[in-house]
Image (cartoon, grey):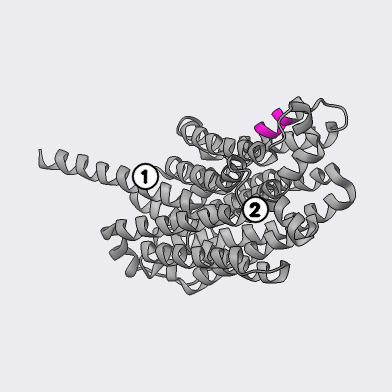
Amino acid sequence: MNIESNLVKNNFFSIHAIAIISFAQLFGTSLWFSANSVVLDLIREWNISVADIGWLTNALQIGFILGTFFIAFTGIADRFKASSIFAIAGLFGAIFNLCFTWIANGLIEAMIYRFLVGVCLAGIYPIGMKLVIQWAPNKTGQVLAKLVAMLTLGTALPYGLNGLSANLNWQYVITFSSVLALIAAILVLKLGDRKDYVSAIKTKHNSQALDIFKIPKFRAAAIGYFGHMWELYAFWTIIPLFIVKSGIPESLGFSNVTLLTFFVMACGAAGCIFSGFLSIKIGNARVALGALLISGLCCLIFALGWRLLPEWLLFIIFVIWGTTVIADSPQFSALSAEACPPEKLGAALAIQNSIGFAITIISIGLTTYAFDYIGLNSAWILLIGPVLGIAGFYYVKNS
């Protein structure tokens, strides 16, 4: 009876912890696209171009990359409490986001504060992944699917808030993201780490972060993840502009572009949850590659057919694209987590994230720059990710 009672108790605490971490991820990652959710206001108020929005987005991405590189190569993710790192990152991320909102006056100052927010997000997203794996080490595909679903909702949340409060000043929309990040920090700090996991990690740290790529299964999963990342953040950055340029608001008789964007992005949360359940039946690899293939096909169909297809059908393509473009992420991360030893888990996820987000700088920069010149044909740039991700995964796996 004692054994059964302990199992039930441990399972209860695991479910409780995963729920807390998932909601903290939702609140904390609302910082990510808080500025992009008011992109039309920024273009009008600061008199900046679409390419400038790309620079603003990439400032955050660069901050995230440097933050994750620091975490990976110093090994702090595997030497200190993940909950403490998350809480500190959430606190300072909220502060820098407020500075962007109320102090920045123009693009350069805004880029500095968004860069600092990106550094803080390095202590939220990959650290949140490590935390949730601590509590459910045997269900990585499922729990990471829930976590990335919350990341997706967190990313889309500012669009929804902005769309629902059309008369609200854009500064208040972004301030709300800072409040959510503070709540996330408090939630995770109160939860703490799983104690037995922390003690095991303290005795096993190895700082050679790049050694993880010597493991073929990790290398294959990482390459698939990199292809996914090329497409994902460029898509999330450009989608409101694609919606406007496609004439969808006028055709649907619904002019609220931010709510349309929120719906397309938020559908990705459902895609993540479904991918988690599907991975139980057919495996992480098949789900990841299937989702990457479908999102790539959506990109191809849109790039070929935006001149010919009716606007309502283009919006359906965007919805399917938004659902699948993120659904592969938790499965590739699960494959990576399963391939590496526990003592290298924090560093491995951080280094994979840092390289993945370095790739997004190129794809976001190219897509936003190209949009100013070739409009919707810039979608062809996004297709590079799914093609190389799928091809690279199979090449490494079979070599």
| Residue 39 coordinates in the image, percent (x, y) | 70, 52
Is any atom of residue 122 visible in this view? no
| Residue 53 coordinates in the image, percent (x, y) | 74, 58
Name the front one of labels 2 and 1. Answer: 1
Residue 143 vs residue 227: left or right? left
Is residue 317 shown in magenta? yes
Which residue is more in the foreground, 204 or 395? 204
Mark 1 burial class by Cα count in 10 Å: few <14, some 14-19, many 20+? some
Residue that mark 2 sits on: 226
Is any atom of residue 29 visible in this view? yes
Secondary structure under the numbered disc 1 in the rendered image: helix
**Would you identify the image quadrant in which residue 379 lies?**
top right
- Secondary structure mostly seen in the magenta stretch: helix
Three-letter amino acid code at the position of disc 1:
Ala
Mark 2 burial class by Cα count in 10 Å: few <14, some 14-19, many 20+? many
Residue 368 lies, with reference to residue 98, above or below; the image says above
What is the spatial separation of the Cα atoms under label 2 and label 1, in whole angstroms?
Answer: 28 Å
Which residue is more in the foreground, 46 or 327? 46
Residue that mark 1 sits on: 19
Is residue 360 shown in magenta? no
Residue 322 vs residue 375: left or right? left
Secondary structure under the numbered disc 2 in the rendered image: helix
